[in-house]
Amino acid sequence: MTSSLVPFSTELDHPSPYYLGAEIEPQLPEVLTAFEHDRCFLVTSRPLYERMGRGLAKRLRQAGIALKVVLVGDGEREKSWRSLRQLGEALIAGGATKDSLVLALGGGALGNLVGLAAALLYRGVRFVEIPTTLMALTDSTLSNKQAINGRRGKNLFGSYHAPVLIWGDVAYARSEPDRQRRAGVVEGIKNLLITGRGRAEAIELLNAWRAGDLLGLTRRLIDSKLPILRADPTERGSAIILEYGHTFGHAIEWLAAGRLFHGEAISIGMCLAAQLSNALGCASDRFVAEHEELLGERLGTPTQLPAEIAPRQLLETMHRDNKRSRKGLGYLLLRSWGEFVNPEGDRQTKVEDELVLKLLSQQAAPTTPRVKSVR
Ligand SMILES: NC(=O)c1ccc[n+]([C@@H]2O[C@H](COP(=O)([O-])OP(=O)(O)OC[C@H]3O[C@@H](n4cnc5c(N)ncnc54)[C@H](O)[C@@H]3O)[C@@H](O)[C@H]2O)c1
């Protein structure tokens, strides 16, 4: 189904034009040509190249754009030094100059890898995000954070590098597997929770997802995040609230080693944060139940710690996480929609490890469903 092109600006410190629509690929050559360049490098994975990259490359070449294709591995494991070095060297070997444009066609992981390579190459070349997943359309492309993982955790090495444009053609994301797309909705629910926009809006978001209205869903998810980013584009101040559920979630994602999608790990992390707030006497039972209802029942993402993740192991991983500061491990906790337990400064609340361990041990009941491998 073809829709009209909807251009708008992210209005951030380094605003990136975001072009959103469905089946808008025919208009990309003209937009790219407006950015003076010597050649373009289309970086994508083999499966995505077969699925949509080949057609895109043909269209760009037919429009007179000098284009080279660079294939890389895809997914979380490829956010590595090895992949970063290989990509950087491939771009140089392919003749990339400071005047080249690097196009990242893929999900959030590929976008992060290509974005970091573009940030480092010649101290920064221009790059274009062409997201192919709901998560990338609505989340990773908006924040200019590019990163690879380290041996001890996620996103340990990175940089801020804004794309010169984001080309959000939801048609590319139609082939995304259901479970993965579902995981891409989680951060939107989180954004509504942290800004206090209310349960009714969360239900509307979930209805758009259930109806398969990918364009409408994408717009809603973008709108849930952009106002927070506009107020704090580098996410070092007020936008820290975007990390709700991530203290637990990032560590769970890391320990699940590919068996959980990012959004699934964050879904569990948000439920744990609500339970922790409840255990501290801050959040009501009802607020905890709302997390379970919106995420577990309505969206269908996991809400319980996988049985194979031991509570102590999770706590240790959290302590090592990249969000660790000299102040030590803290938690973003809500009392209710939009109301943080600590409304000041970094909004973090300190909690004794023993209490967290007790909560996690209660979660790690033998009946907890095991996560199935997704790779
Ligand atoms: N920079 C940020 O602020 C930020 C924000 C959110 C997430 N992220 C990062 O994004 C990553 C997760 O991104 P993701 O959810 O897009 O997953 P992903 O990029 O890991 O992709 C998952 C799999 O989906 C495949 N895929 C991609 N598009 C597809 C399509 N259209 N059809 C079929 N398969 C397709 C990929 O090839 C890959 O195998 C994580 O690394 C996370 O850390 C970054």
Image (cartoon, helix red, strand yellow):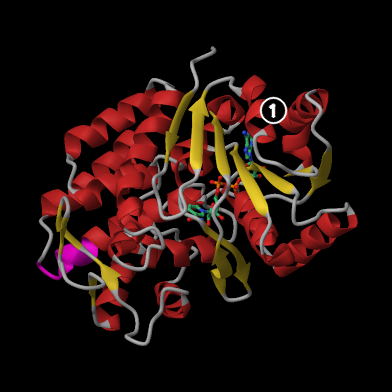
Q: Relative to residue 362, is residue 8 drawn left or right?
A: right
The quarter in which the N terminus is drawn is top right
Q: Under tag 1, what secondary structure? A: helix
150 to 241, vertically: above or below:
below
Tell me: residue 167, above or below residue 113.
Answer: above
Q: Between residues 328 and 141, which one lies in front from this camera angle? A: 141
Estimate the x, y position of residue 209 in percent, counting from the top left: 39, 28
Residue drawn at point x = 53 percent, y = 65 percent: 254
Q: Is residue 112 left or right of residue 47?
A: left
Q: Position of residue 129 (x, y in %)?
A: 60, 43
Give residue 342's quadrant in the image. Answer: bottom left
Q: Crowdedness of circle 1 by 10 Å Cα count: few (<14), some, many (20+)?
A: some
Q: Residue under circle 1?
A: 29
User: Would residue 375 be visible to someone looking at this image?
Assistant: no
Q: Position of residue 262 (x, y in %)?
A: 49, 52
Q: For the stretch drawn in magenta, what is the main secondary structure?
A: helix
Extent of the magenta region: 275-281
The amino acid on which the numbered mark 1 sits, given as a three-letter code, is: Pro
Does residue 151 appear in this view?
Answer: yes
Relative to 357, say whether 76 is above or below.
above
